Image (tube, rainbow, N blue to C red):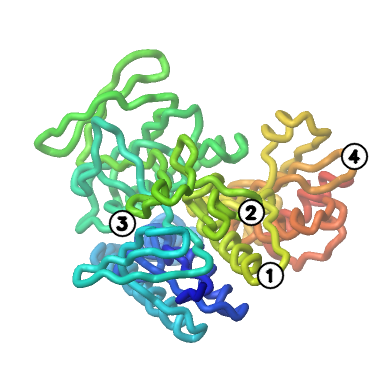
Amino acid sequence: MNFDFDVAVIGSGPGGYVAAIRAAQLGLKVACVEKYPVLGGTCLNVGCIPSKSLLQSSELLYKISHSSKDHGIQVENLSFDFSKMMERKQKVIQGFNQGISGLFKKNKVQEIHGTASFISDHEIEINTDSKKEKLSAKYFILATGSKPIDFPFLKLDEEKILSSTGALSLPKVPKSIIVVGAGVIGVELGSVYSRLGCKVTFIEFMDRVCPPLDSALSKALKKELEAQNMEFHLKAKVTKAEMSNDGIVLTAEMSDGSQKSFEAEKAMLCIGRRPYTDGLNLEGIGVEKDSKGFVKIDDNFRTTKDNILAIGDIVAGPMLAHKAEEEGVVCAELLAGHSAKINYLAIPSVVYTDPEIGAVGLTEERAKEMNLNYGAVNFPYKANSRARCMGEDAGFVKVVFDTKTKHLLGTHIIGPHAGELIAEASLAITKGLTVTDIATSCHAHPTLSEAFKEACMQADFKALHI
């Protein structure tokens, strides 16, 4: 059978557009179908990129207002222009939108806009406002991402009840926000608005912030954010919502069983995301999903239809842009006949708060659950020369390691530039390095990276500066 394309990718988020480019680089004829008018998916348009843009702007403001005097810098009548912040954010997004289109042209990926629906294993119908067309491919890669979850009694309207999408597009800074869910998205966007003068209150069902993190990082992060005037209510469950003249009132069942009401101008729901496969007609062609809506795949990303593969947020695993990218690359390489795989233990996660968090590998709790012979040590940023010079010495580097083999099992960092520093730990886990390998590797002085070296020294024999 003759096909229009070797590979058609549905969805142009981080997983989809990367898969399309890599497949084209490997000599395959590729199309990428995107539902929306612009490329980039959630991450670029209403997720990672806009949130990091606003985090950067608000962090700059916060540090000027709170730390400049320590550096001998006097700033009078400090103010900010929220509309300018939003305008800058949008310019960053548009630049990347155009960049992906340019990369598609450079690599001869055909860009198609419209809503895709499967007719058969090898054919989809693409609907636009003006027409319908059909496209056939030998292989399909599903990369349609995820959407925010809400409550039956608390539906998103993006005016008073916001998702992360709505929170990234507000016309002005609200006086107060209740954030339901103190996960990564919640604490990041909560940080943005808190720095801009908004009263931010978190209601979290679990017993800690950012629950997947190592508990030591979670505890330290909560302490630092509370010092920035953010308020947390843990082990609390929202049970009721009512609109008021000034905003919204949420009722929550607290950890002691009592009921408490919280009122704010806005509420932001950050309680998770669900895989988005609506309209694809996967059931009609026999592509199976699990009870949570995730597409079932094997170790090579193949669904229950061998020629249809799936990656990113619509399959099980952490909903991370870089995880989707890695899966996209591996998918493309497998379809081109190459051998490729992913070490999921080496995929890092980052929380872009202040202080920042970077984590990779096993937490201490997970190592304990697995009955491993493990050790865990911390090295404080207060003992790092560069952090002290920066005036940002809150936090620490924690390493989890095998006490017999000395192999690095996990690294957990809270402090300045943790998201950049975690790459070394990710590489170490990927390559199966030991704490000895890192401890005996020269790191430039004075740098923050020395904190990771010293943590590994402490794990191997003895750190020098504690």
Q: Which of the numbered marks, if any, corresponds to residue 404?
A: 4
Query: Where is residue 228, by image quadrant?
Result: top left
Q: Secondary structure at mark 4?
A: loop
Q: How many marks?
A: 4
Relative to 443, is 124 on the left or the right? left
Look at the picture and state if 35 lies above or below 412.
below
Q: Spatial distance from mark 1 to mark 4, Cα to Cα?
A: 39 Å
Marks 3 and 1 sit apart, C-alpha to C-alpha, by: 41 Å
* Eye-nearest disc, 2 or 4: 2
User: Which numbered disc, 2 or 4, marks the residue that appears first in the sequence?
Assistant: 2
Tell me, yes or no, whether the two marked residues, 2 and 4, touch with CB atoms within 8 Å.
no
Identified by mark 2, the residue type is Ile
At x 50%, y 39%, the residue is 210
- Rounded to the nearest whole Å, what is the CA distance between mark 2 and mark 3? 26 Å
Residue 245: tell me if it is visible.
yes
Q: Residue at x 76, y 45 (%)?
A: 409
Residue holding disc 3: 168
Q: Disc 1 designates what residue?
A: 337
Q: Element under label 2?
A: loop
* x then y, percent, for residue 33: 39, 68
Q: Quadrant of residue 75?
A: bottom left
Mark 2 highlights which residue?
347
Categorize mark 2 by other alpha carbons within 10 Å: few (<14), some (14-19), many (20+).
Answer: many
Looking at the picture, which amino acid does disc 1 mark? Answer: Gly
